[in-house]
Amino acid sequence: MTEVIKEYAEALFILALEANKEKEYMKALEEALSAFESEPDYMDFLSAPGIPLGERVGAIEAVFGGRLPSNVVSLMQLLCEKGRIASYKSCVNEYRSLLLAKENITSAYVTSAVELTEAQKTALIRKLEKLSGHNVQLHLTVDSSVIGGIMVEMDGKVIDGTLRQRLREVKDVMNQ
């Protein structure tokens, strides 16, 4: 993600804070993202330099104006005007990170070889909360190539407790 996209998300978050509408803006951002993901041609249209800018910006107003908060619509129009609409999802993710940080919640992205049981999820959340000092929101992915164990990415750090990683470590020791 570029620094500019981060700044756009931060600016929108500041506006949301001032209006006490952080969650409302998050919901609106996600609604627009869902629309973009369900209609990929729309994003292509908004990114097409051959279509007049006024037409593209007007299309955002036509689709989202009056339905979403004006600041969210303005953000999408600004991204379109600056040729950065393709980075909309990154902007939404950054805004989400800011909202979670405000609420003292950190996201943990967990990859495991098999689906975790509820008891395993609960135990993992407790350990990660103790480690981070924050409430933890898990995002789980199953990847059979992991073989065994889990990999956790949280707060920019990776905790790799996978069997694949352990085998790499053994191989490295053997090659010394």
Image: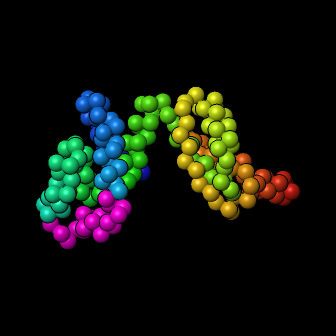
Residue 5 is at least partly visible in this image: no
Judge left or right: residue 98 versus residue 151: left
In the figure, is residue 106 to the left or right of 29? right
Q: Is residue 140 visible?
A: yes
Quarter assignment of residue 62: bottom left
Residue 116 x, y percent position in the rendering: 66, 49
Q: Is residue 37 magenta?
A: yes
Q: Where is residue 106 drawn, in percent x and y?
A: 52, 37
Q: Is residue 30 magenta?
A: no
Report the number of discs.
Answer: 0
Q: Residue furthest bottom?
A: 50
Q: Colour scheme of this structure image?
A: rainbow
Residue at the image point whose x is 20% and y is 57% from the top: 63
**Residue found at x 26% / y 34%:** 15
Q: Could you tell me which quadrant the C terminus lies in?
A: bottom right
* Most common SS among magenta residues: helix
Q: Nearer the viewer, residue 169 or 153?
A: 153
Residue 41 on image: x %, y %: 30, 69
Q: Decide which of 73, 86 is in the foreground and name it.
A: 73
Q: Is residue 114 shown above or below 118?
A: below
Residue at 16% in and 54% down: 61
Residue 25 placement (x, y as % from top left): 30, 41
**Quadrant assignment, res 130:** top right
Relative to residue 61, is residue 18 depicted above or below? above
The answer to whether 46 is drawn above or below residue 94 in the figure is: below
- Residue occupying the point 36% across, 61% down: 37
Highlighted range, magenta: 35-53
Q: Please determine whether, in this image, residue 70 is positioned above or below residue 56.
A: above
Q: In the image, 60: left or right of 13?
A: left
